[in-house]
Amino acid sequence: MKRHSMFLILMTVLAAGQLASKQAPKHASPKSPAATAAPPAAAPFVFKISSQDKAKKNPVPFTDASVAGGKKLYATECALCHGANGDGKGSLASVLKVKLLDMTKPGALANRTDGELFAIISQGSPTMPKEEGRLSTTQRWEIVDFLHSLGGKTPPKATEREKLQLERTIVINH
Ligand code: HEC
């Protein structure tokens, strides 16, 4: 019995606190249907990338081999949101109500360095899952190469040496 009333007191205190904190914006009562029906237009998420990360050079040469590898990974990791062809119209994008960049437009990613793209893929966002710890470094750079091909950039054929190098590093997860 005692325990029960303590719980009630605690809940009352908590609820009072909740109400007090909700009072600042005058008309937004907690859980008002209006608030859920028309959420304020959220500011677009801005990726925070250090200048060090921006300056990172892509160690995986842009070749048909790296693009092919990146394409496979893209299909399983990214297409659901960004669209099978990169147009930003993946099925999950509409469910999440996010408007995504059309990466098939030539130059759509021109304002991003490879290091930036790598950081975006590695870190993700509140909506986008991060690939660090899931995909190896080489695999993430392969995806960067593939993204460049979306805008119409054609990769040169990989040399035997480049293919070997790619195979050697692809599974090393770090
Ligand atoms: C669950 C959905 C989802 C998945 C899966 C996803 N993304 Fe994203 N991506 C987003 C959203 C949403 C944004 C915009 C930032 C935000 O609102 O969080 C974004 C932004 C980006 C951007 C920045 C584009 C710009 O506007 O400059 C790139 C590049 C990108 N994603 C690449 C990828 C790659 C590559 C993959 C797969 C490894 C991937 N994303 C997987 C949802 C997703």
Image (cartoon, helix red, strand yellow):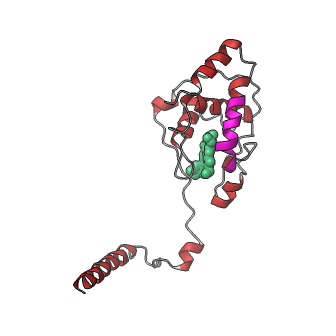
The residue positioned 61% from the left and 23% from the top of the image is 60
Taking depth in this image into account, of 136 and 81 the one nearest to the observer is: 136
In the displayed structure image, the side of residue 124 where residue 50 appears, left or right: left
Q: Residue furthest bottom?
A: 1
User: What residue sits 55% from the left and 47% below the top?
Assistant: 129
Q: Main secondary structure of the magenta part?
A: helix
User: Residue 113, can we see it?
Assistant: no
In front of the other: 46 or 127 = 127
Image label count = 0
Quarter of the image with the N terminus in it:
bottom left
Residue 57 lies in quadrant: top right
Q: Is residue 42 magenta?
A: no
Q: Is residue 134 above or below residue 35?
A: above
Q: Residue at x 71, y 24 (%)?
A: 65
Residue 99 vs 58, above or below: the answer is below
Residue 104 picture quarter: top right
Q: Residue 73: percent from the left, percent from the top?
A: 66, 37
Q: Is residue 70 above or below residue 124?
A: above
Q: Is residue 174 left or right of residue 103?
A: left
- The single residue placed furthest to the left in the displayed view is 2
Q: Is residue 30 visible?
A: yes
Residue in the picture at 35% in, 79% down: 15
Locate residue 161, reporting x and y percent.
66, 12
- Looking at the picture, how far across and down is residue 99, in whole percent? 66, 54
For the record, the magenta segment spans: 68-80
Compare residues 123 and 45 and report the one nearer the observer. Answer: 123
Percent x, y for residue 156?
75, 19
